[in-house]
Amino acid sequence: MYKIVYFLFITFYFFQIPILYAQEIQFTESEKEWIKQHPIIEFGYAPNWEPYEIYSNNEYTGIVNDYITKIELATGIEMQPIPNMTWEKSIIGLRDGSIKMVPSCAITAERKKYLNFTEAYINDPLVIITRKDYEFIGNLNDLIDKTVAVPKGYYQSELLKKDYPNIKLSEQNNVRASLEALSYGEVDAFIGNLGVVSYYINNKGFTNLKIAAPTLYKDIGIAFAFTKDWTIFRDIVQKILNEISIKERSAIRKNWISVRYEHGVSWQKIALWVGATILIFLIILYILWWWNRTLKREIKFRRITEKRLNNSISRIEQQNKEKEVLIQEIHHRVKNNLQVIMSMIRLQSSSSKNSEVISSLNQATDRIRSISLIHEKIYSSNDLGNIMIIDYVNSLGDEIIKNLSSTPIRLTVNSNIQNLNLKSIVPLALILNELITNSLKFGFLETVNPEIKINFESKTLLKMSYFDNGIWFDNPKSDNFGTSLIEIFTEQLEGTFILNKSKLGTEYIFEFDLLD
């Protein structure tokens, strides 16, 4: 008898999960009826658009699949990927109506003519990818009359054909084929989604490729797309997407994507020095062992052995000092090179008459200055591996305030931790650069006694809070590139953040997993 009761309990429990989930979302009667009439829905997809969509061994996975799972739980509908699908087939099917929906589709003017979209739930900029040994590429204009790889049917083709007709497009079967063509020198560049190309470069062995430059397509929205006759299902899916919090979305993305940020230190040289140091250390250990046995047999050579040992130790100490000086010199030269770059950007800015170009160049200069200040602090520090966090943040804030504000701004920095390593401080510096700059530009225009408070504290995670007492206004001309940078660098540090706005001011609260 108890086995029957147990079975009924388990059955009831698992069948109740989607019902309880659905009760949190208020579907209309017509929506409920539509769900009931469509227990199984097939969809198209791009099988090799990693990490967003992956179809391998008859299994569909990736970031988008995590969102589809939430739709299945909320509605009870079984969502099935169509076997042997390509993105080109998906687009053709959406046009002729044989496919009713796809879960990830870029929102473009052309596609709006025959599709309905939810709000975008993925926003990544398009970037330019080249080989590491290729000539300098700064923007899309530098690719005119050059050959650029794009996957068949992807939105890059539509945008480039419209805005840059003089760029030669080489259509490939998918993202991997496009990157392989670039890696083998068959094309000059590839235009792709930042999250996708970062995943392929970091995880798929494309070590000779690099992210060369951004494009003007900085905020391409990816959404669920439906044929015009499936508007009701679009509304159902939008309700479900509205219930997915920023924290849940960040967790889904963090599980799949790791954007790596390369800074100015030559890790190859550091690895060479570390290897040399280890080799010398092993040699010294061997000498000590060998001389120890010799001393037991030949006491008369003790003085000679001690002298040789002292000489060896002296040489090691001298070499260590030389290494420290060399590493300091590397940081000094990196700082100087970054200052040269800033000077070149300022020179370019002064020669431009376009206010948007000037603003973008000035923002780039501010970001480079944040990194340059790190290398300046390392060069003057006795500890080459860590940065004093309060000293650095005060210096960074004072520098930005001096350059952007003519009125006094009160800056307060508190921390219960003393130092952060170089790997962590660079992304943190760029996040703070964006926040302080935005406060000065958009938060303090009508604020009396403007104030910024930054606080660091650590327990199991590093928590950073940023507060200003300004009343922010939205900039209609903003491309939200700074916000994208904050999100990207937060993910790089395996962190999350929340934004609180009130009459008292604006507060960002970050949590980073840096203290393992």
Image: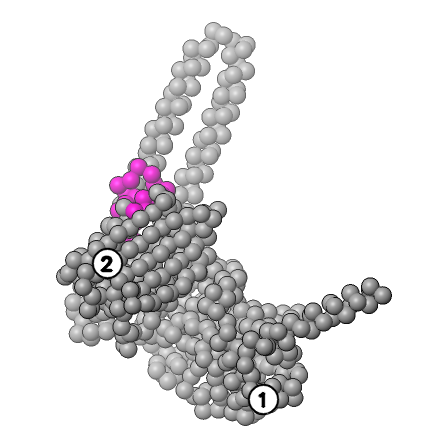
Q: Check the picture and name the quadrant holding the N terminus.
A: bottom right
Is 513 placed above or below 52 here? above
- Name the spot of residue 298 as percent of width and height, x first: 51, 9
The residue at 19%/60% (across/down) is 449
Q: CA distance from mark 2 to mark 1?
A: 52 Å
- Name the spot of residue 270 as percent of width and height, x first: 40, 43
**Crowdedness near tag 2: few (<14), some (14–19) or many (≥20) residues, C-alpha within 10 Å:** some
- Name the spot of residue 354 as percent of width and height, x first: 20, 75
In this figure, which residue is indicated by the disc labeled 1?
A: 29
Side of 281 relative to 214 (left or right) = right
Mark 2 or 1, nearer chain start: 1
- Name the residue type under label 2: Glu
The secondary structure type at the circle numbered 2 is: strand
- Say whether residue 377 is magenta: yes
Side of 19 relative to 232 (left or right) = right
In this figure, which residue is indicated by the disc labeled 2?
A: 451
Is 415 placed above or below 502 here? above
The residue at 21%/61% (across/down) is 450
Query: Which quadrant holds residue 67?
Result: bottom right
- Is residue 227 in sight in this rendering? no
Residue 206 or 240: which is nearer the viewer?
A: 240
Residues drawn in magenta: 370-390
Q: Residue furthest top?
A: 300
The secondary structure type at the circle numbered 1 is: helix
- Name the residue type under label 1: Glu
- Is residue 228 in sight in this rendering? yes
Residue 144 or 368: which is nearer the viewer?
A: 368
Is 420 placed above or below 500 here? above
